[in-house]
Amino acid sequence: KGVGVAWSADRKTAHKVLDGEKKDEISLNMAEKLARDKFDLPVPKTSTVLPQTAPVPTASSKSIGFFERLFSKRGVGPDGKKQFKDYDDWGSYEGDVDEAGNRQGKGKMTYVSGNYYEGGFVNDKFHCDKGTYLY
């Protein structure tokens, strides 16, 4: 919880983030100042991530319905990598998983939007004191 900044992938717009929720658009100068003063971070580089096709949700049944695709939180991408959806943003995951396939321990999520998180996971969620979420 707290204050942050969310940049668009092309870095031409920025929004204030409050308690994890994107709020009003702010000037790029204000966004840069907030990132530097609060987090000691520069403006992230422009995203070079190419759009990906949506992953295929994993399911035990052979038939996957419309709602299961819409509300699924995990799948397998066309490249065979594990895919997860956090906050409506799909991405590929590299790291440790438990026996149920949940993200657990150290890992890195790289999202289609260009955002990424690198750090610890507990029970399939971001969790650690020194993780980095770059957006």
Image (spheres, rainbow, N blue to C red):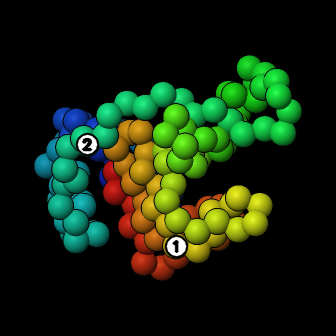
Q: Earlier in the sequence, mark 2 or mark 1?
A: 2
| Residue at 71% from the left image edge and 58% from the top image edge | 101
| Residue at 68% from the left image edge and 27% from the top image edge | 70
Q: Give x and y (percent) for residue 49.
A: 31, 40
Q: Is residue 76 left or right of residue 44?
A: right
Q: Secondary structure at mark 1?
A: strand
Residue 14 placement: quadrant? top left
- Residues at marks 2 and 1, CA–CA distance in whole angstroms: 23 Å
Residue closer to the observer: 75 or 9: 75
Q: Nearer the viewer, mark 2 or mark 1?
A: 1
| Residue at 39% from the left image edge and 54% from the top image edge | 116
- Amino acid type of disc 1? Lys
Residue closer to the observer: 16 or 76: 76
Q: Give the number of the disc on residue 106.
A: 1
- Amino acid type of disc 2? Ser
Farthest-out residue, left: 29
For the residues labelled 2 and 1, say whether their Cβ atoms are less than 8 Å apart: no
Q: Give the number of the disc on residue 47.
A: 2
Residue closer to the observer: 126 or 79: 79
Q: Is residue 88 left or right of residue 51?
A: right
Q: Is residue 67 left or right of residue 91?
A: right
Farthest-out residue, right: 61
Q: Specify few, some or many for label 2: CA neighbours under 10 Å numbering under 14, 14-19, or 20 or more.
A: some
Q: Is residue 17 visible?
A: no
